[in-house]
Image (cartoon, rainbow, N blue to C red):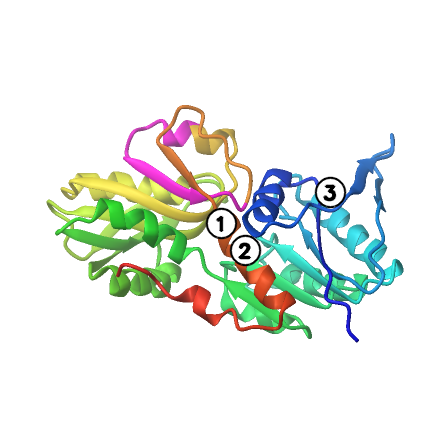
Amino acid sequence: MKDTRLKIFSGSSNRSLAEEICQSIGVPLGEATVTCFPDGESFVKINENIRGADVYIIQSTCPPTNHHLMELLIMIDAARRASAARITAVIPFYGYARQDRKDQPRVPITAKLVANLLTAAGANRILTMDLHSQQIQGFFDLPVDHLFASPVFFQYLALKRSPKLVVCSPDVGGMKMAAAYADSLGASLALVAKKRVNATTVEAINIVGEVDGCDVLLVDDITETAGTITAAAKILREHGAKSVRAAISHCVLGDVAYDRLKSGHLDELITTNSVPVDPRDLPITVLSIAPLLGEAIVRINSNESVTSLFKIKGF
């Protein structure tokens, strides 16, 4: 008889999220030692029996990205060598996802390399959320359960319904996501055309669509420097937008981002706890994805479908 014991462990990147997930499904967080040697090498020891168990390792690859990625690989290897029956890497934020193609000569496809590393370490399945591009699922020769943060956002946005709502993409690449949000919210659609000056600076140059007197919702999957969303919010204000909010799945914010968010162009930045976020007295609302991930883990453990988790309530 197959052992379906459910065991959840956490790396050091986002332990608070792991604890919330365990609390939401009534499963204790597994005991593991995750630490570093003085020279910076990661050390992992799983402190309980997982032989024949269904193991889930929760780790976002947020900064310091390379450290957290290596820690995840070591935890997977430790679980494999401890004879776990199945190992699922739960990666709420999949780092290196933007390096998913060769857009210039002599550059790597690092998103594929990370997929290879996870497979080589011994992962049997991947559970992640809002990948930068859908094709990254094809980089794995393993089952990938790809969740979306949109149901969590919609539940919150239902409290802020507006008769003149416009969903806006801050760049051409996000139009598909923006169109899905606009369709679900019954809103109009707009686009900000931008020009990237360098890796940290973006210039918004035009708007496609009508935003004058409207409440605008910017949607994107990730922001680090907040350059794109603040530049978009500024030009939307200049074109008469009544209010500007942004719904961003992963906010990996640095000091530059916080400085830009102080500009006041955004009324609210709505994000998730896929990575740790410090609001710093700014209008940042952090929504929890723990119930969503917890339900997905329970369904995977019992071999049930996760498709119904994509259904939106109240719209």
**x 18%, y 57%: residue:** 209
Q: Quadrant of residue 96?
A: bottom right
Q: Tag on residue 67?
A: 3
The range drawn in magenta is 259-274
Q: Quadrant of residue 184?
A: bottom left
x, y percent for residue 176: 35, 66
Q: Is residue 266 visible?
A: no
Dot 1 falls on a residue whose secondary structure is loop
**Amino acid type shown at disc 1:** Ile
Dot 2 falls on a residue whose secondary structure is helix
Asked whether disc 2 touches disc 1, contact meaning CB atoms under 8 Å apart, the reply is yes
x, y percent for residue 266: 30, 36
Quarter of the image with the C terminus in it = bottom left
Q: Along the line of sight, which residue is nearer the eye, 105 or 144?
A: 144
Q: Mark 1 = which residue?
A: 289
**Amino acid type shown at disc 3:** His
Quarter of the image with the N terminus in it = bottom right
Q: Quadrant of residue 286?
A: top left
**x 44%, y 30%: residue:** 279
**x 14%, y 54%: residue:** 210
Distance between the Cα atoms at labels 2 and 1? 6 Å
x, y percent for residue 61: 64, 48
Asked whether disc 3 touches disc 2, contact meaning CB atoms under 8 Å apart, the reply is no
Q: Is residue 270 magenta?
A: yes
Dot 3 falls on a residue whose secondary structure is helix
**x 39%, y 31%: residue:** 260
Q: Mark 2 = which residue?
A: 293
Distance between the Cα atoms at labels 3 and 2? 23 Å
Q: Is residue 155 visible?
A: yes
**Amino acid type shown at disc 2:** Leu
**Callout 2 environment at 10 Å: few (<14), some (14 to 19), or many (20+)?**
many
